[in-house]
Image (spheres, rainbow, N blue to C red):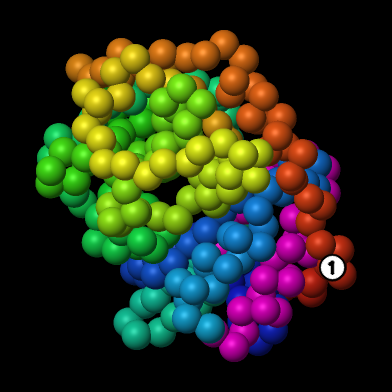
Amino acid sequence: MVYRWQDGLLQLLEPGDAGGSSIVAADSWLVSDGLVLGLDLHRARFRAAVRERPDLEPFWAAVLGMIPRHGDWFPRVELRERRGTSLLAFRHRSAPARSRSVVLATHHGADPRTRPTVKGPDLEAMSRLRAEAQQRNAGEAVILSPEGFVIEGAHSAMLWWRGDTLCAPAQDLERIDSVTARTTLTLASALGLEVLAESVTPDDLDGLEVWALSALHGIRVVTGWVDGPQTAEQPGRAQVWRRRLGKLARPLPQSSPPLTTLGE
């Protein structure tokens, strides 16, 4: 179900009501039995993208009030625009199926991203990249820079291990500021592990443990790379880190259920 924020209420959108509009910004996160990882980071990322809308705080509070505290959910907030008019919207969604491993395929065409650091405007383009990867028997596409360096996946961030050093793409490679990847890197630093940012080609990752991270799946171990490097996995490491991230999940803030208009 999709709701729009209007007159201080979340109002159910009828099919087609959002037709012709484009997504300016979006954010989504996994809620499992009322627990969520990095909610404040998701909020901050969305707030930066929508540029301090004065109605963002009541909208955000209403959204949190709509999310059930039992079951698995994958809500998404959006700022949409149509003919110069913008609206805030909320997609109330059950969580899709999740996995703990993934096969990658390198995207060899031009980079389709129009706003690489903002989540939302390129969602359709990223879904097309993933669909193309699926036709190649992969689950995720990897975007490279013009120099051939790994930037990110279509719907995930990329990290890899060199021994006990956790590595990420170089900071000058523009990409979405992944909440899951940022949390993982921060935790690694807090545990005293070395964290390194570097520019690498897919071939440079041969023999390394590679992770694809996202809010939905958390940490997925890369178990294959179509026409790419042979990745490796240290048994048990990803599971340890999944448990560590799980301990950082916090309950959704308590909020009174918002009034809604259901289009009776």
Which span is picked out in magenta? 53-77
In this view of the protein, which residue sits in the foreground, 50 or 152? 152
Quarter of the image that includes the N terminus: bottom right
Identify whether 253 is placed above or below 208.
below
Q: Is residue 139 left or right of residue 64?
A: left
Q: Which amino acid, mark 1?
A: Ser
Q: Is residue 25 left or right of residue 45?
A: left
Does residue 1 appear anywhere in the picture?
no
Q: Is residue 111 left or right of residue 117?
A: left
What is the x, y in percent for residue 195? 48, 41
What is the x, y in percent for residue 180? 56, 45
Residue 209, image quadrant: top left
Q: Is residue 9 magenta?
A: no
What is the x, y in percent for residue 128? 28, 41
**Residue beneath the point at 79% across and 72% down:** 258
Residue 232, image quadrant: top left
What is the x, y in percent for residue 75? 62, 53
Mark 1 sits on what residue? Answer: 255
